[in-house]
């Protein structure tokens, strides 16, 4: 049955914003037909111009506001919303936290799990300037090399110097690098022709250590004027401890290649998380908001109820952030992760911190769980911190067969969390405490959370 579409491209309609989508767009209904409108908030009365029409929904743009939401913030720079750096930048922070709590509540309700309570989102005192890592594309715009961010859904670069959600020391380091690349006429990579030298500038900074790393991602093996650029960075960025060239000469959307050349200083920088020292190389996965990561992981550890006698499995363990923090409170920790470089980092970090009761294995979490189960391993607690696609069904089944008493689920996607709560339910696991959302990415629509499940005999 063909849906009759009541709106037409380029036409304008009066409308009231009824909701905010999980991507942070306002939702208006015209004859019950949904139109997604960026920079529109619930309760606002607007004039919407239709920009794109599909069979079951449309996109629009606000042409005028008749009324504005009391939760609206006037964003001083529209670039933040245009580029997706801060898609919720126009919403008061208290309302952002409510929006994230509500996202989880709504999905639980749809899944008929509305008896599960969701606590208010744990926010930040200063919900900006928090990112400890930036990956900034470099492009030639009207004859001048620019750094900035892509407009949402496009490859057109918006030049930006102050990224709002990034550590200001990172922003100023990027400006220093940009000016040096201009000075020495280093050409930006052009994805249409595959010619040009510099693709991306990546900067990482330790939140506690204040050590800073600059990574120049090049399309070529040779970086022209490398010595002059390095000397300029050392002179212009006082905290720099490491300057690395990363070579990415493939036609790919991947930001980093596999080869690194240290041009100056150390191969890695260090930072601390929950009192543990972590080595961070250009390719290391490391949480971008350390203050909130500490609160997220501390919540997970507190809920695991460890007293030093337990065996814990950390699925999707990455560089061992949770595993190593848990090791202080457990008898033995096992971590599994599919990325070999991450496991190398985890072993390296365990050694550096003198942690001897944590073992790390490379593999698919679900395959490794089957092996551990076959070997008769009986974990007391399983911690899962999966990617956005959630936990593999076979891993949930293996957890049930190993009869782990408790599961701590650290989620970065409420939709797969709710699906997995149902699947864990089939294995006899039930949510025993309210879910705790944590705001890891203020000004964006992402929401992390900690859920505690315990096994009741099936």
Image (tube, grey):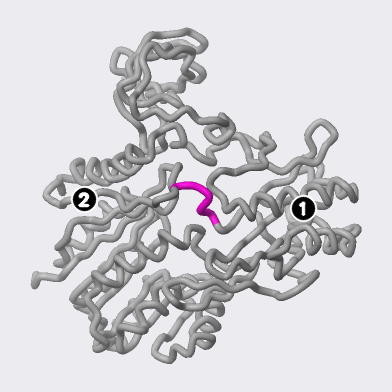
Residue 178 visible? yes
Q: Circle 1 sits on which residue?
A: 177
Q: Give the Cα distance between marks 1 and 2.
A: 44 Å
- Residue 2 can be seen, yes or no: no
Region of the chain picked out in magenta, as a range: 127-131
Q: Write the residue at 26% across / 52% down.
A: 418
Neighbourhood count class around disc 1 (C-alpha, 10 Å): few under 14, some 14–19, many 20 upward: many
Q: Main secondary structure of the magenta part?
A: loop
The residue shown at (71%, 61%) is 215
Q: Position of residue 204 (x, y in %)?
A: 62, 61
Can you tell which quarter of the image residue 96 is in? top left
Q: Quadrant of residue 443?
A: top left
Q: Secondary structure at mark 2?
A: loop
Q: Residue at the far left: name it.
A: 457
SS assignment at label 1: helix
- Left or right side of 28 for 268: right
In the rendered image, residue 380, in percent from the top left (x then y), is placed at: 23, 80
Q: Which residue is disc 2 drawn over?
A: 118
Instruction: Name the one closer to the observer, 433 or 108.
Output: 433
Q: Quadrant of the C terminus?
A: bottom left
Residue 318 locus on image (x, y percent): 47, 70
């Amino acid at each position: 049955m063909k849906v009759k579409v009541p709106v037409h491209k380029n036409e304008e309609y009066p409308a009231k914003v009824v909701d905010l989508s999980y991507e942070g767009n306002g939702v208006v209904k015209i004859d019950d037909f949904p139109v997604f409108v960026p920079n529109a908030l619930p309760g606002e009365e607007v004039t919407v111009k239709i920009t794109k029409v599909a069979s079951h929904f449309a996109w629009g743009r606000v042409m005028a506001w008749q009324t504005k939401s009391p939760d609206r913030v006037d964003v001083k720079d529209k670039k933040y919303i245009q580029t997706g750096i801060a898609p919720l930048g126009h919403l008061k922070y208290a309302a952002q936290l409510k929006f994230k709590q509500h996202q989880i509540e709504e999905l639980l309700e749809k899944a008929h799990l509305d008896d599960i309570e969701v606590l208010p989102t744990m926010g930040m005192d200063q919900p900006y300037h928090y990112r400890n890592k930036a990956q900034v594309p470099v492009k030639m715009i009207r004859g001048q090399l620019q750094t900035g961010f892509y407009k949402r859904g496009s490859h057109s670069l918006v030049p930006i110097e102050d990224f709002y959600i990034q550590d200001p020391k990172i922003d100023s380091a990027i400006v220093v690098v940009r000016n040096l690349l201009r000075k020495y006429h280093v050409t930006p990579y052009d994805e249409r022709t595959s010619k040009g030298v510099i693709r991306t500038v990546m900067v990482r900074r330790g939140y506690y250590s204040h050590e800073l790393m600059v990574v120049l991602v090049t399309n070529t093996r040779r970086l022209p004027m490398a010595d002059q650029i390095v000397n300029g960075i050392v002179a212009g960025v006082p905290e720099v401890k490491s300057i690395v060239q990363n070579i990415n000469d493939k036609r790919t959307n991947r930001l980093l290649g596999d080869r690194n050349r240290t041009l100056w200083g150390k191969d890695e920088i260090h930072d601390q998380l929950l009192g543990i020292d972590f080595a961070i190389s250009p390719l290391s996965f490391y949480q971008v908001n350390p203050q909130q990561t500490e609160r997220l992981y501390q919540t997970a550890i507190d809920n695991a109820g460890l007293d030093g006698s337990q065996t814990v499995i950390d699925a999707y363990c990455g560089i061992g952030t949770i595993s190593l923090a848990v090791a202080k409170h457990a008898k033995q920790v096992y971590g599994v992760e599919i990325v070999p470089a991450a496991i190398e980092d985890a072993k390296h970090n365990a050694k550096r911190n003198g942690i001897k009761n944590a073992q790390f294995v490379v593999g698919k979490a679900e395959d490794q769980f089957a092996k551990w189960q076959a070997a008769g391993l009986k974990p007391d607690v399983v911690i899962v911190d999966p990617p956005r696609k959630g936990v593999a069904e076979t891993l949930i089944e293996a957890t049930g067969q190993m009869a782990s008493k408790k599961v701590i689920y650290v989620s970065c996607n409420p939709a797969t969390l709710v699906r997995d709560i149902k699947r864990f339910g089939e294995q006899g696991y039930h949510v025993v405490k309210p879910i705790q959302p944590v705001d890891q990415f203020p000004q964006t629509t992402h929401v992390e959370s900690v859920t505690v499940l315990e096994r009741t005999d099936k």
